[in-house]
Amino acid sequence: MREKEFLPLVREKLGIEKLNPMQLKMMQAHSESRDIILLSPTGSGKTLAFILPMLKMLRPSTGRVQAVVVAPSRELVIQIAGIVGKIAAGLKTTPLYGGHKVEDEVNSLAAGTDIIVATPGRLLDHINRRNIDVLPTRMLVLDEFDKSLELGFETEMRKIVARLKNVSRVILTSATRADILPDFLKLDNPLTLDFLEDNEKLRNRIRVHRVDSDANDKLDSLLTLLQNLSAEGHPDRSIIFVNHRESAERVANFLKRKGLPAVLYHGALDQREREQAVARFNNGSRPVLVATDLAARGLDIKNVRNTRPLGTITTSRSLPKPGHTVTAAPPALMPTATYSCLSDLTRILRTMLLLTIPDILIRRKSPGWPLSRKPSFSLPDDARNCQKEISSVSW
């Protein structure tokens, strides 16, 4: 496709008048005929950044697969396919993911398609069933590659890459740096574009506050915090992240018993249940979403005020990006995030926009978070450097 075919649609369909520096750089990098590794925080416009050079490589519709995009979650697949479908005029885009009838996908593939956007497991299943011929594929994008590895999809991706024998260009996107890439990625002199440090706007929008709790079970502490952040008895729209599905169910059930309108979101739910959970959270009927890390990337949720990772944290986790959505960046990319030494409830990240997104992590200090007194929040007036703007919450 030519730029004059899809750039007007970027303005018309997506409402983007001007590409950001990363997107422009990716457009320029296309002419170098090299594989690309794009390192960028989630929420920085990365999806459009890899879609634009991908479209430049595609020919008019042939009914055969020209490009494959692999993403780690259903939500990301739906999001990417939606954007591609709006601006790839004349090309058919087919999303493949679990949680709905496979027959619908088989019928769509049988009619021919130009672009596949899929989760690793679902794509490999269609390949093994010979529902799709990926041999003509010339372009491969592995989006959120770091998250795919974290979720254990390396075996599936290895098998998929082995089937794509005619790929001439690979784009790899990641929100974290990797010293060594898996050996199945035979990248040809890749060009690395690193935008991980290009985060000054985020630093200028965040303030950090710490809440200390020593209770072994943080549920009562969490309840008190939610109640004190409520406006006139109505809970602020909040996301609570936990490590496991069982923990998510326990926390959600506890909050419901205490009268808080919470909704559950994790990978064991089918697609319809997950969509309903997000819809209820979005429309405000269930202002508290209790979720596993599955919700950390790929969700489009507006007007979120609080996010709280809850429970023992031993590895890098994802934080919601400040702005109009909750498509989160890993904490290593956030100006204050150092999770390796944290094990429960402690920081509130609050944006300086119309939206405020505090983030609470829990740090276990000496025992005791007395709940007999109401908290008084000490908020700094300015947050130019969030790492320096740390204030405690007294109890």
Image (cartoon, grey):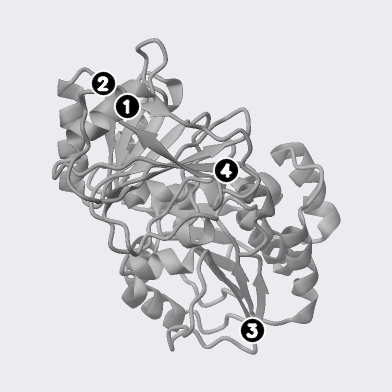
Q: Secondary structure at mark 4?
A: strand
CA gap, disc 3 and disc 4: 34 Å
Question: Which residue is identified by label 2?
Answer: 260
Q: Give the labeled residue for mark 3.
A: 190
Front of the two marks 3 and 4: 4
Residue 386 to residue 286: above or below: below
Q: Mark 3 and 4 residues: CB-CB less than 8 Å, in contact?
A: no
Gap in Å between the C-alphas at discs 3 and 1?
A: 47 Å
The residue identified by callout 1 is 226
Query: Who's the residue at 56% across and 51% down the image?
Result: 388
Front-most of residues 70 and 349: 349
Q: Secondary structure at mark 3?
A: loop
Would you identify the image quadrant in which residue 266 lies?
top left
Disc 2 or 3, which lies upstream in sequence?
3
- Report how far apart the C-alphas of labels 4 and 2 lie in the structure: 27 Å
The amino acid at mark 2 is: Leu
Alpha-carbon neighbours of circle 3 within 10 Å: few (<14), some, or many (≥20)? some
Mark 2–mark 1 CB contact (< 8 Å): yes
Of tags 3 and 1, the one toward the viewer is: 1
What's the residue at 71%, 60% (across, down)? 52
The mark found on residue 206 in the picture is 4
Q: Are marks 2 and 3 in contact (CB under 8 Å)?
A: no
CA distance for labels 2 and 1? 9 Å
The first of marks 4 and 2 along the sequence is 4
Instruction: State the separation of the CA atoms marked 2 and 3.
Output: 50 Å
The answer to whether the residues at label 4 and label 2 have Cβ atoms under 8 Å apart is no
Q: What is the x, y in percent for residue 218?
A: 20, 40
Q: Earlier in the sequence, mark 4 or mark 1?
A: 4
- How much space separates mark 4 and mark 1, taking CA atoms? 20 Å
Q: Please name whichever residue, 336 or 136, is drawn nearer the observer in this view of the structure.
A: 336
